[in-house]
Amino acid sequence: MKKEAIILTQNLKTMKFLKPLIFTFLLVTVAACSDDDDLPGIINEEEVITTLSVTLTPDGGGTAIVLTSTDLDGDGPNPPTIVGGTLAANTNYTGVIQALNELENPAEDITEEVAEEDDEHQFFFQAVGPNLNISTTYSDFDDDGNPLGINFSLTTGDAGDGTLRVTLRHLLDKFAAGVSDGDITNAGGDTDIEVDYSISVQ
């Protein structure tokens, strides 16, 4: 029993010695894990866009047509309110896009951010439906000469109805085949917003 008591006493002394060392090790480990410098940063998050407006002004003067999409509850359950428009047949329009985040007060103009990061963003325009005869041409470009699309031209053909789909992509491949011509097929990247506007050409 005397030998066992001696061993037990030695073990207790060892544990008393190790306890501070273990505690110090845990503190160092927690501090290292909480070091923000070791954590990867979040880069180029998707833009929060609650309102997308497309203003189309006929060349030579006339009343501008404003297409709007408003979704003030963001990711909430309510669908966006989308207002399309009626365009004149065989007419050229100057187009301007404005993107807003109205969850902020005052509203944040996302268009400015898209313009500042023009090499990472691009708007795409698609005429959906066999009876909608419209075409678009980019009017603004990034430093590499690749299109952006905040400013563009739209030309209507003969009368018809359909949908104008406007899509904003970011972190896309602007050098992929067809992208510089406005073809979204090979663009890749992430979609910040996509809106289908009902269009009637008369």
Image (cartoon, helix red, strand yellow):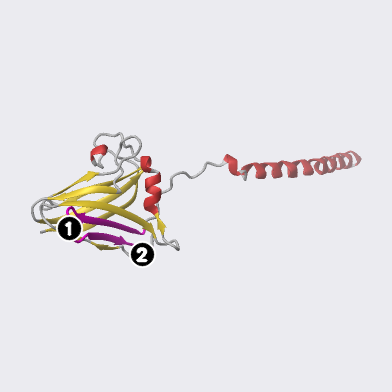
User: What residue is at 36 percent from the left and 52 percent from the top?
Assistant: 111
Residue span colored magenta? 50-73
- Vertical order, 70 against 185 (above or below): below
**Snapshot quadrant of residue 177:** top left
The x, y position of residue 147, in whole percent, is 29, 40
Q: Secondary structure at mark 2?
A: loop
Q: Which residue is mark 2?
A: 77
The x, y position of residue 198, in whole percent, is 19, 59
The x, y position of residue 77, in whole percent, is 36, 64
The x, y position of residue 41, in whole percent, is 51, 43
User: What residue is at 77 percent from the left and 40 percent from the top?
Assistant: 21
- Circles 1 and 2, Cβ within 8 Å, touching? The answer is no
User: What residue is at 34 percent from the left and 55 percent from the top?
Assistant: 99
The reply to whether residue 152 is visible in this rendering is yes
Distance between the alpha carbons at the discs numbered 1 and 2: 26 Å
Q: Which residue is mark 1?
A: 199
Q: Specify the farthest residue to the right.
A: 2
**Which numbered disc flags the more N-terminal residue, 1 or 2?**
2
Give left or right: position of 32 versus 138: right
Q: Is residue 165 magenta?
A: no
Q: Specify the farthest residue to the front.
A: 60
**Snapshot quadrant of residue 143:** top left
The reply to whether residue 171 is visible in this rendering is no
Give amino acid for label 2: Pro
- What number of labels is visible? 2
The quadrant the N terminus occupies is top right
Determine crowd level at label 1: few under 14, some 14-19, many 20+ residues with C-alpha closer than 10 A.
Answer: many
Give amino acid for label 1: Ile
The quadrant the C terminus occupies is bottom left
Give left or right: position of 100 versus 43: left
